[in-house]
Amino acid sequence: MKLDLNISIDSLAEVPTLAREAEALGFDGLWASETRHDPFLPLALAAEHTRRVSLGTAIAVAFPRSPTVVAHIAWDLAAASGGRFILGLGTQVKGHNERRFGVKWVAPGPRLREYILALRAVWDCWQDGTPLNVRGEHYTLTLMTPFFSPGPIAHPRIPIYIAAVNAYNLRLAGELCEGVHLHPFHSVKYLREYALPHIEAGLARAGRRREELALSTSVFFVTGRTREEMAKAREGVKAQIAFYASTRTYEPVLAAHGWADLMPRLHRKSVEGDWAGMASLISDEMVEAFAVTGAYDELAEQLTARYAGLLDRLAPYLPLEARTDLETVRALAAALSARL
């Protein structure tokens, strides 16, 4: 398995140091998310200050940006990084598209399929001179003059990963993509019994082999240097599980364990703003299903036992309060990269 690190920062000024350290510690990749910062800008800085690690978005929200806009950004990052860039895309949910981004919501799966094909059509136009002729339900792209074409680059085959929880996107990843971002809110049971069968169906539809698709995820950790730190981490993981499990999108993860009836209870509490009450509904059994528990020097062995032969790359999912604690990042990174 490849070991990655999520770029969790307060300021872009932190990226050069974090990226250099991550590469020196032996990480294989760096992922930037679309949360408090744009997902692409940190990677431009990381490309300048690293030479080996892959650099990707996990994820960039697709629909607020046109395929041509994203094609340009990805093309530039692929060129600047010497072919190390991975374009990770996600649909986000209806509320965020409509109320955070102001984007009309339509069936996300078919739209994402068309989006991926449109991206590749633009890239083919730039690399090989293929006439741009995208005419779909959601996107029509037919104009690309030489003035607006960046022209060929040395590494034009930019890998596309998509975030997938439910059946359609899991099959779409298997059919069209180079990788899939599996959500950190997952269990091995969900991966084996739900996600993999849909992924394999998509691979079969396209006549592809499992080796042609990278399975990537972040992992919840209950860890720390002391018993008190581990207890605090456990409460943080319970809160994170409760947050995701309150959303209908993640019902298949709960359903894999027979816990689907928990979702509406959590949702009601989220509407009421009862965040502490939400976390109290998460049992220790759920924590063990959705998180890896142990001291720093135990994590690598547990990750290997849980995910070897199942996933291709993973990253620690750090609780919010640890994201700016660089000493925690360094200690965790050193423990994992030295042993995986």
Image (tube, rainbow, N blue to C red):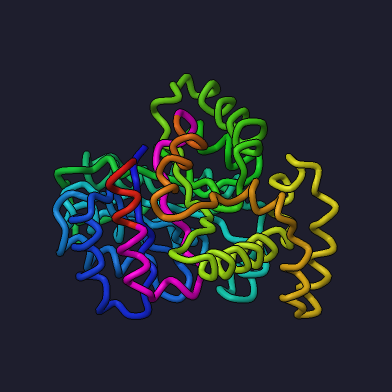
Q: Report the magenta residues as a range.
A: 309-332
Residue at the image position 53 percent from the left and 65 percent from the top? 227
Residue 243 lies left or right of residue 8; in this view the side is right
Q: In the rendered structure, does residue 325 fall within the stretch colored magenta?
A: yes
- Magenta run includes residue 25: no
- Residue depicted at x 25% and y 79%: 13
Name the quadrant containing residue 100.
Answer: bottom right
- x and y, in percent, of residue 235 in the image: 63, 68
Indicate the quadrant where residue 178 lies.
Answer: top left
Please identify the quadrant where the C terminus is shown: top left
* On-image quarter of the N terminus: top left
Q: Nearer the viewer, residue 283 or 35?
A: 283
In the displayed structure image, the side of residue 79 where residue 297 appears, left or right = right
Q: Is residue 324 left or right of residue 156?
A: right
Task: Return the x and y of residue 63 as percentages of the image width and height.
Answer: 52, 61
Q: Residue at x 54, y 64 (%)?
A: 230
